């Protein structure tokens, strides 16, 4: 079955055919395997895809990378007719000389065309462009600037497409490429995303015989299998299938969730954690108004009423109130995975931004999911970066702001931010259109609420008391109690039961009588006021909390 070309490929073709671009920077998922929709489909590299699918009609295809140097992938005889070629010397290996050498050949071919002679069509593929001409802030490296100038000339000064020429610069990330190239307005910048389901289905068709044992139960359901691996690279899926085939372990339906989690986490090199939630909103104690609101939003999501869905939530409140737990319960209620963004910051120039690009590419490839960012006040960057970070913080802010405000993502994935200091998050990142609903999460401040919280967490450790046993303990309950604090009290009581053979009632009484607040009440109160000020709905705030803060 013939399959349509991926969107990025048709974008390149249309831009080239229309004359709007002749030199392209291909970035993103460039090191993956690619499905080549040929008469006999196969898998190959991006270089193979460009040479065999994108420019099959070109007479000469030249590639260059640091490891292999210059290679004539197609049209060696035609290339050898160039008078400027010194056959006894060989190709120059150094980047500057190699790129200038290729540029001279392009000029020679254009000159042939100018005098009316027969001129070959030439395509140039530069692999690992970010290694050849990297972004080095404040570097007075004239060789790098010279390389960047040549590549800019391919996109601006010389209209390659009018001369039957095309150039492809392959770079994993835009942010690690020389800014003269990355920011050139006439350069055709095209992101290669993670493979879509249709491409993965093509991969299954290529591998179904070679990996017959792995796909034994799904030979007639390859499209369905492909859909279960959305968000993973072709390389990871191919490796998995070949390994399962070798081990004679056919895929089973209950394998897919865990396997996909492993593949995605491995592809992202620890930048994200992929969690399949095992709890829902019923596991949250109290917060009935909040739970009702969230369930209404999820009902809209299931009915595809996406225009009524929020772009994101901010859970704000004192430390220990269970903001992360609530986010996971929300995702479990929705029946979607949670992508937890971990520490993406790096000390190397451009690496932090490159890590964010990789995370965004994953999100675009996944189906519906929730994106959780804990300690958002520390992670999201600042509009005005600090003087000591070379502007990284401001660039992170800009990238996050642009991604969070993209209207095409409404209903596809939902941002969930958590912070005990929401006042430190840039106002623009919290505005409607990025974060539409801000939900305060408060500690328990009234006796019955505090008692219910402590009962629930003691019950998880099998510390069960009767109502009569709980009654005299009420006078010892703390004035303010977070979920984290209640859990700490329950753990201490459980230790007393196990270590000193006390009864649960005796242990809990002793803990309550001797416990001191793990976090100063002044700190908790201050953070509660911040959360109250952020709340988008007055109904999220109970009268008990208002009276306590008053």
Image (cartoon, rainbow, N blue to C red):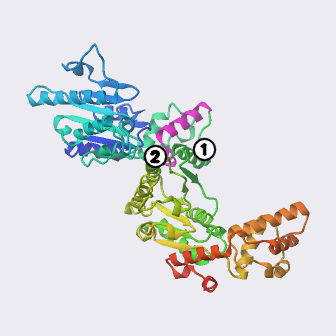
- Inter-mark Cα distance, 1 to 2: 38 Å
In the picture of the structure, the residue carrying the numbered disc 2 is 351
Secondary structure found at label 2: helix
**Mark 1 against mark 2, which lies toward the viewer?**
2
Q: Residues within 10 Å of mark 2 (few under 14, many from 20)?
A: some
Q: Check whether the beta carbons of the residues at disc 1 and disc 2 lie within 8 A of each other.
A: no
Q: Which of the image's four quarters has the N terminus?
A: top left
Q: Splitting the image into 4 quarters, where does residue 402 fall?
A: bottom left
Secondary structure found at label 1: loop
Residue 41, x across and y down, in percent: 39, 33
Q: Is residue 362 above or below residue 167?
A: below
Residue 165, x across and y down, in percent: 21, 34
In the displayed structure, does residue 92 sit left or right of residue 353?
Answer: left
Q: Residues within 10 Å of mark 1 (few under 14, many from 20)?
A: few
In the displayed structure, does residue 21 sit left or right of residue 40?
Answer: left
Which mark sits nearer the N-terminus, 1 or 2? 1
Check if residue 232 falls in the magenta segment: yes
In the picture of the structure, the residue carrying the numbered disc 1 is 252
């Amino acid at each position: 079955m013939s399959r349509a070309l991926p969107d990025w490929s048709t974008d390149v073709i249309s831009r080239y055919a229309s004359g709007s671009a002749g030199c392209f920077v291909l970035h993103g998922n460039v090191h993956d395997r690619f499905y080549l929709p040929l008469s006999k489909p196969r898998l190959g590299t991006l270089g193979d895809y460009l040479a065999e699918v994108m420019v099959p009609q070109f007479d000469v295809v030249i590639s260059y990378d640091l490891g292999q140097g210059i290679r004539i992938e197609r049209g060696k005889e035609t290339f050898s007719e160039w008078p400027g070629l010194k056959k006894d010397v060989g190709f120059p290996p150094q980047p500057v000389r190699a790129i200038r050498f290729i540029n001279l050949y392009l000029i020679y071919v254009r000159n042939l065309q100018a005098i009316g002679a027969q001129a070959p069509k030439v395509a140039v593929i530069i692999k690992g462009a970010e290694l050849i001409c990297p972004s080095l802030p404040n570097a007075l490296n004239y060789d790098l600037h010279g390389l960047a100038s040549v590549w800019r000339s391919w996109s601006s000064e010389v209209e390659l497409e009018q001369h039957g020429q095309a150039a492809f610069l392959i770079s994993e990330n835009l942010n690690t490429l020389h800014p003269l190239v990355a920011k050139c307005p006439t350069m055709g910048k095209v992101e290669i995303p993670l493979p879509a389901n249709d491409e993965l289905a093509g991969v299954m068709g290529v591998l179904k015989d070679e990996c017959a044992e792995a796909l034994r139960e799904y030979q007639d359901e390859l499209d369905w299998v492909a859909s279960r691996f959305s968000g993973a690279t072709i390389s990871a899926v191919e490796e998995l299938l070949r390994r399962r085939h070798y081990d004679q372990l056919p895929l089973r339906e209950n394998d897919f969730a865990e396997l996909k989690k492993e593949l995605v986490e491995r592809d992202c090199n620890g930048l994200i954690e992929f969690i399949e939630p095992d709890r829902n909103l019923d596991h949250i104690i109290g917060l009935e108004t909040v739970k009702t609101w969230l369930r209404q939003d999820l009902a809209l999501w299931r009915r595809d009423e996406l225009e009524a869905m929020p772009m994101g939530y901010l859970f704000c409140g004192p430390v220990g109130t269970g903001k992360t737990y609530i986010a996971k319960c929300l995702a479990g209620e929705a029946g979607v995975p949670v992508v937890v963004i971990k520490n993406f910051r790096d000390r190397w120039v451009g690496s932090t931004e490159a890590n964010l690009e990789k995370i965004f590419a994953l999100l675009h490839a996944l189906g519906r999911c929730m994106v959780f960012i804990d300690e958002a006040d520390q992670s999201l960057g600042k509009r005005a970066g600090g003087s000591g970070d070379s502007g990284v913080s401001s660039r992170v802010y800009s990238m996050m702001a642009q991604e969070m405000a993209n209207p095409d993502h409404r209903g596809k994935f939902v941002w969930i931010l958590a912070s005990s200091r929401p006042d430190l998050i840039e106002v623009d990142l919290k505005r409607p259109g990025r974060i539409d609903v801000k939900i305060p999460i408060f500690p328990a401040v009234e006796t019955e609420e505090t008692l219910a919280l402590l009962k629930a967490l003691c019950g998880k450790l099998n510390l069960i008391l009767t109502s009569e046993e709980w009654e005299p303990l009420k006078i010892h309950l703390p004035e303010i109690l977070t979920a984290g604090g209640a859990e700490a009290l329950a753990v201490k009581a459980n230790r007393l039961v196990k270590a000193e053979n006390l009864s649960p009632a005796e242990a809990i009484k002793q803990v309550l009588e001797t416990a001191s607040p793990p976090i100063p009440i002044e700190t908790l109160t201050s953070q509660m006021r911040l959360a109250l000020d952020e709340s988008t709905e007055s109904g999220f705030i109970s009268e008990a909390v208002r009276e306590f803060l008053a």
